[in-house]
Image: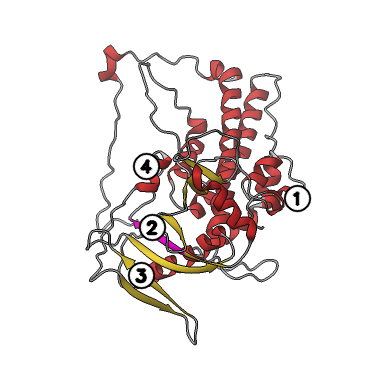
Amino acid sequence: MRFDAGASGQMMQSEVFMDEDEIGVVFPAVGVPGALAVVCRVKNAARVRALHDAATPASYRVEAVVGSHLPLMGSLEELVSAAPANSLSVADPPLPIYVHRGGRDAVYLDLQSATGGPLSSVGVDVDADSPFAAFAGARSAANELLDVLMRSLWMPLVLVRLDLFVGGEPEPVAHQLHLPFVGDVKIGPLGGFHQYPLFAELESLAREAICSTSPYYRLLCAHRLYEGTGALRAKLRQMCADLSIDVPLPKDPKVDRDLLVAMGLGGLADQNIRTVNDLHGKMTGLRNSVAHFLLTKGEPAAPLHTSDGMSYNVYSCAAAVLLHYGVSALQELSAFFRQHLNSHVSRGSVLPMVQQRDCFKVVARMSPPPSEQEPL
């Protein structure tokens, strides 16, 4: 699978009119929450596109902002200016430090501290032929430094955002970050929700995928989610047969080829993918690389290097797309259930009134632990 910047190698952008100081998304062309994105101020967009199209080696400086977790919400303006916290302090910043792989294969990085104490970012000098290559190369180098620190420091350190500088300029020309999920939603007044046991595991898995800050785990959850919709289809089909309901289930959702191209997954778009089942099958290799360290079937392949910047890009966009379609499939089956089956299986249910809430509480009992004499 290849990762590209749009159709035919050209960067794609949406036709949206914005003020020149607003933050807009340069890539991907479709804003799927959770996907890794390149954003910049509107006044810098033409320059970022020109640097990409020129495909000429240039000197970039990337400041990889370090925190303890990835933010999943917030406006783009908030995300590009955030100064996340972590527990690692830097003595005498900026602190130059190298990562050496042997021979002449070494890279120098700078540990920065904006306040003279806690680590704020890892500075990386990159010789790259495009902003995308600079982001990928810097992510690999900064990640591998953090990986080495894990030998003796079990400390949550992640790259929250990458800021791209050109030619020693004081202001970044672009940023790379994860697109946030929807926020500022108000709930109520309402009575409550039906939590259908038939859907409980799948809805839990969907939330697990949404809340994950790792594109690798998100892809694994999204893969399992779509697998689960297949089992759900079988159960719904059997329920319809048992109740003599002659209504066809929703078909497997179709995949929009333009969405794959816009997300930089043009290689998949060229493989005759029509439905989510086709997409799920083509992504099995990605799923297997996450689930297993060594792949023993098919052509020999190196283990997935989760700190590699290009792999991170690919998995981020692939996971966002697969989650998008997995949730869509689940929503269609849920709507079918509510329309055709819920009235049958809900007979005999009571309406819990707030005046009787004492009758509707969680009841939990902890089984006593087995004694040392009792066999397990």
How far, Cα to Cα, is label 1 from label 3? 41 Å
Verify CB contact (< 8 Å) between mark 4 and mark 2.
no
Question: Which of the labelled discs sits on residue 110, or is there none?
Answer: 3
Instruction: Tell me which label, 4 or 1, sits earlier in the chain.
Output: 4
Verify CB contact (< 8 Å) between mark 4 and mark 1.
no
Verify CB contact (< 8 Å) between mark 2 and mark 1.
no
Q: Residue furthest right?
A: 272
Q: Residues within 10 Å of mark 1 (few under 14, many from 20)?
A: few
Q: Given the image, on which type of amino acid does mark 4 rest?
A: Glu
Task: State which mark lies toward you, 4 or 1.
Answer: 4
User: SS of the residue at dot 3?
Assistant: strand
Q: Given the image, on which type of amino acid does mark 2 rest?
A: Pro
The residue range painted magenta reads 61-67
How many discs appear? 4
Instruction: Tell me which label, 3 or 2, sits earlier in the chain.
Output: 3
* Spot occupied by residue 103 in the image (x, y as percentages of width and height): 49, 87
Question: Which of the labelled discs sits on residue 170, or is there none?
Answer: 2
Residue at 58 percent across and 57 percent down: it is: 51
Which residue, given by chain and number where applicable, does mark 1 sit on? 270
* Spot occupied by residue 200 in the image (x, y as percentages of width and height): 47, 34
Q: Residues within 10 Å of mark 4 (few under 14, many from 20)?
A: few
Question: Which of the labelled discs sits on residue 78, or is there none?
Answer: 4
Q: Residues within 10 Å of mark 2 (few under 14, many from 20)?
A: few
Residue 367, by quadrant, is top left
